[in-house]
Amino acid sequence: MINKTQEKKLHQKIFVKNLEVECMVGVKIHEKKIKQKVIISSFLKVDHIEHKDEIKNVISYESVVNIIREITSKKHFNLVESIAENIASSCLQLTGCLEAEVIVEKTEVLKGKATVGVIVKQKNK
């Protein structure tokens, strides 16, 4: 059992890793015409709460996936940085989220399995 003093110091991280989505991203002419596959991972530092094994008491993974899909489907982005910043900002609006780290990787820039991308970390104040 966790006492109240310990509970205030504890945090958890929830994550969605390697979610593949197609979106419009890039500054080159050919990138503005077709969707590209990107891989997105999101790691959220959240307040530790007594969840009582109830989904209503925690941030749902489905909420995070919905944020990612909504943002990547609504418009063209020039930079993966903008996608990551938008996702992080939206995740920080979820109750209990203290910090959001988002990784966006473009998979079709280099040959082979190499990816390029960005990691963005934002905190609630």
Image (cartoon, helix red, strand yellow):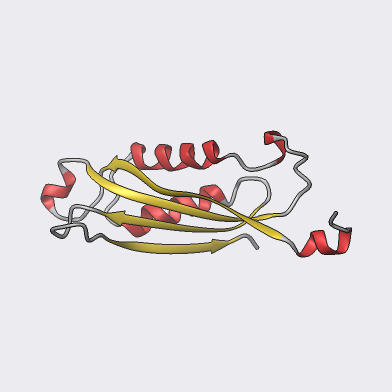
Most distant residue in the front direction: 1
- Which residue shows up at 25% across the image and 49% down it? 25
* Side of 15 where 27 appears, left or right: left
- Which residue shows up at 32% across the image and 41% down it? 21
- Could you say where residue 7 lies in the image, as x and y percent from the top left? 81, 59
Q: How many tags in the picture?
A: 0
* Side of 47 where 69 appears, left or right: left
- Could you say where residue 54 lies in the image, as x and y percent from the top left? 72, 35
* Side of 122 where 56 appears, left or right: right
**Does 92 sit above or below residue 110?**
above
**Does 13 sit above or below residue 36?**
below
- Which residue shows up at 16% across the image and 60% down it? 110
Report which quarter residue 85 is drawn in.
bottom left
Pick the front one: 110 or 125? 110
**Does 72 sit above or below residue 78?**
above
Q: Quadrant of the C terminus?
A: bottom right
Pick the front one: 69 or 3? 3
Q: Quadrant of the N terminus?
A: bottom right
* Side of 100 where 72 appears, left or right: left
Report which quarter residue 100 is drawn in.
bottom right
Pick the front one: 24 or 108? 108
- Could you say where residue 34 lies in the image, as x and y percent from the top left? 17, 40
